[in-house]
Amino acid sequence: MIVAAPPFPVIETERLKLVSPAGPEFDAQEAFLMPGAPKFLDHHPDDEATWWSVATIIGHWHLRGYGLFAVLNRVTGEPYGLVGPWFPKGWPERELSWNLVEGAEGRGIAEEAARAVLDWLFTDQNWPSIISLVDPSNDSSVRLVEKLGARAEGTFAHEMAGEFRIWRHVPRTAAGKRLLEGLA
């Protein structure tokens, strides 16, 4: 029996290439798990926990058909982190999430990648909206969701992850503006 590999989208921006960590062209172990690999800004000091996180991210693509993209420098392939839709068990709905590696922050990478993912979700996948769950004390993430045009709409408390502010993203169209106004 011949089984076709699942198609994984690739999104490109001026500076970035976003690929699925589950795709055959990306080596998630080399990029994120090997000694000397860049650490995520909020990394767990336990290498085993990081391994489980990366395995979960790859599995999410197979279980949901979408997930966090590995964000790479379009020219060099240097990994900058992960950005994309995320919907683990226990989450209230699909979330746009981001996690950069040390050294990638403050360069507009998360915003550029998030805008590209939102365009893909709203245009190609026809999603009507998506949330971001942001720790209210994370000033840089609050600034990012505001730059992306999301609107705050409440809170969500998760037993293990803590309490988050919910921010809603909608397409930048007249229908999206009406949806946001209806949620206010």
Image (cartoon, rainbow, N blue to C red):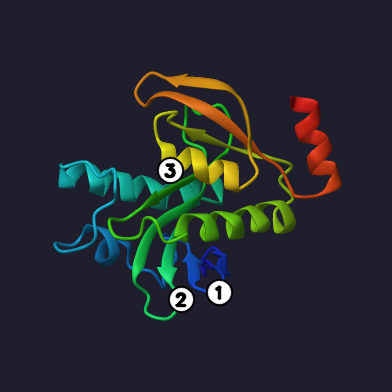
> The residue tagged with tag 1: helix, strand or loop?
loop
Vertical relation: 102 (above or below) 174: below
Q: Nearer the viewer, residue 155 or 139?
A: 139
Q: Residue at x 63, y 52 (%)?
A: 118
When asked about the image quadrant of residue 149, the answer is top right
Q: Residue at x 84, y 36 (%)?
A: 178
Alpha carbon distance from label 3 to label 1:
22 Å
Q: Is residue 154 above or below residue 16?
A: above
- Check if mark 3's residue and mark 1's residue have beta carbons within 8 Å: no
Q: Secondary structure at mark 2?
A: loop
Type of the residue with mark 2: Arg
Which residue corresponds to mark 2? Answer: 74
How far across and how far down the image is residue 75, in percent? 42, 81
Three-letter code, disc 1: Glu
Q: Is residue 132 above or below residue 155?
A: below
Q: Position of residue 93 (x, y in %)?
A: 58, 32
On residue 48, the disc is none
Residue topped by disc 1 = 14
Query: Which of the two discs, 3 and 1, labels the residue nearer the N terminus?
Result: 1
Residue 114: % across, % down: 55, 54
| Residue 111 falls left or right of residue 171 | left
Image location (x, y in percent) of residue 70: 42, 61
Residue at numbered disc 3: 140
Q: Dot 1, how many residues are within 10 Å of its Cα: few (below 14), some (14-19), or many (20+)? A: few
Sequence-wise first label, 1 or 2: 1
